[in-house]
Every structure is written in C-alpha cells, then in structure tokens.
Image (spheres, rainbow, N blue to C red):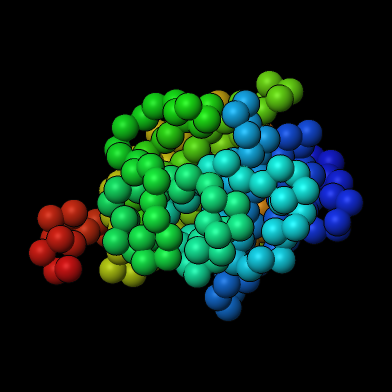
Amino acid sequence: MTPSTTRSPRNALTRIRPDLWQTRLDSPHPGLTTHAYLWRGPRGNVLFYSPATEADFDAIEALGGVRAQYLSHLDEAGPNLARIAARFGPKLHASRYELAEVSRHAVVGVLLDYERHVDDNGVEILPTPGHSDGSTSFLVTGVSGERYLFTGDTMFQTKTGSWGTFLPPGRGSAAELRNSVAFLGTVAPDLVISSAFAGAPFEAVDERRWAQCVREALATVPDQVTPRSQRDESA
C-alpha cells in the first residue's frame, strides 16, 4: 500500500499524512539513506530522528518549529543536533544508555530508559534494544486515528521490498534484536517508518502485512549472540 504524498509550499518537506511530514533525503554515509519526520502532535510539533543538514529548517519553521525531538539510537546523533537546538530549542529525548555519544552534540533533556510508557507529548516509548543498546521505537496516533510506528534502525525495508535488520559488527546483541522485533510484532501499526532504509522509507500496513514484515525481519537476525556482560568487559 503506497500512501499519497504532497510537497510543502517551500518544496522541502513531503506531507505523507495530514499531520506528518518527511524531510528531504539525506545520505550521511555512503550507502546510507535516511529521512526525519515532523509530526504535529497534541502539544506541538515533534521531530523523529534527525535531518543531517539545515536544508529544511525554514520549512520546519513555517510549520511551527519543533517542540521536542526523539532519537531512536546513537547513529542519529551528529553536528546538526546543535543546529536544531539553536534554531528551534526543542527538548531532546534520547536513551540513557547512549547519553555519552549523544551529549557530544547537544544537551539531552529527557533520558529514555527500558520502560514502555506514553509521555506528555502523546508519544509511546517502546524500548527495542539490539541494533544498539539504547535503540528505541516510538508509536503515536495521528489526527485521523492511524497509528504511526517509528522503528529507527531496529527493522527497515530492504531493496527487495521485504523487511530486514542489521547488527553492526561489535555492537548490539542478536538476542535483544530478535526479542525487540518480536515485541514490535505485538504492536498494531497502520504506518511503519524506519530511520535508515534501502527500499521504501515507510509502508502502510494492515494486520496481515505487518505480521509478514515481522517474520521477514526476524529471518534476517544473525545467530551469533554477544552477551551484554561480554560487551561491557571488552569496552
């Protein structure tokens, strides 16, 4: 299912839902493509993930700026966090377990733990460690009642259109990644949006298709498991 999209008047953001905009394509590293997403929440605009440049700042400002920003994991931290903070002053949400990496670039206003809950911005925090120790997914309900699931890099669409996972060498845990993908299978989203992607950046799903996506992603989790204690000892 392919959702309809419209460009913003400034031709920078793509409106993919009445209350949801996608930033322009970024390629922060060779072979890596990402978007960030601006959601018009009940208390103000929320930015999920992080754009790599200032290119969309004027368009974001025209939509009301950013009240809060949520990072799904440490790979989204970079120099642009400081620019976002200076321009919009959002409260930055990031994992407690990746504070050292994120705080090199900006002040973290809210630390996320391994606790599922809905916060004051209407964002449901879904701890999904595995791709990294602090990986977190987010679930919100859109203005039309659709549920938008932001999976970060925990699972994403591949070039073939199936869903997959990636465990960076020497980081994360296959066991935790497998558990996290299975956990996301218990969520009932209508629109699934990853951070990095190789196929489509997002996909509209129903219950049957989502179950298939989860099965596809689980099949890509590697067998090798690096226990957290072993990673801590080698750090």
Vertical order, 17 against 52 (above or below): above
User: Residue 217 at what x, y percent from top left?
Assistant: 49, 48
Please indicate whether residue 210 sits to the left or right of residue 63 in the image.
left
Q: Residue furthest bottom?
A: 30
**27 and 54: which one is in front?**
54
Q: How many marks do you count on the picture?
A: 0
Q: Quadrant of the C terminus?
A: bottom left
Please indicate whether residue 172 sits to the left or right of residue 185 in the image.
left
User: Residue 145 at what x, y percent from top left?
Assistant: 68, 21
Residue 132 visible to the viewer = yes
Residue depicted at x 45% and y 28%:
119
Q: Residue furthest top?
A: 145
Residue depicted at x 39% and y 27%:
117
**169 and 108: which one is in front?**
108
Vertical order, 104 against 60 (above or below): below
Please indicate whether residue 47 sits to the left or right of residue 153 in the image.
right
Residue depicted at x 66% and y 66%:
54
Q: Quadrant of the N terminus?
A: top right
Residue depicted at x 57% and y 37%:
149
User: Residue 34 at what x, y percent from top left?
Assistant: 61, 61
Residue 215 visible to the viewer = no
User: Residue 100 at what x, y percent from top left?
Assistant: 29, 61
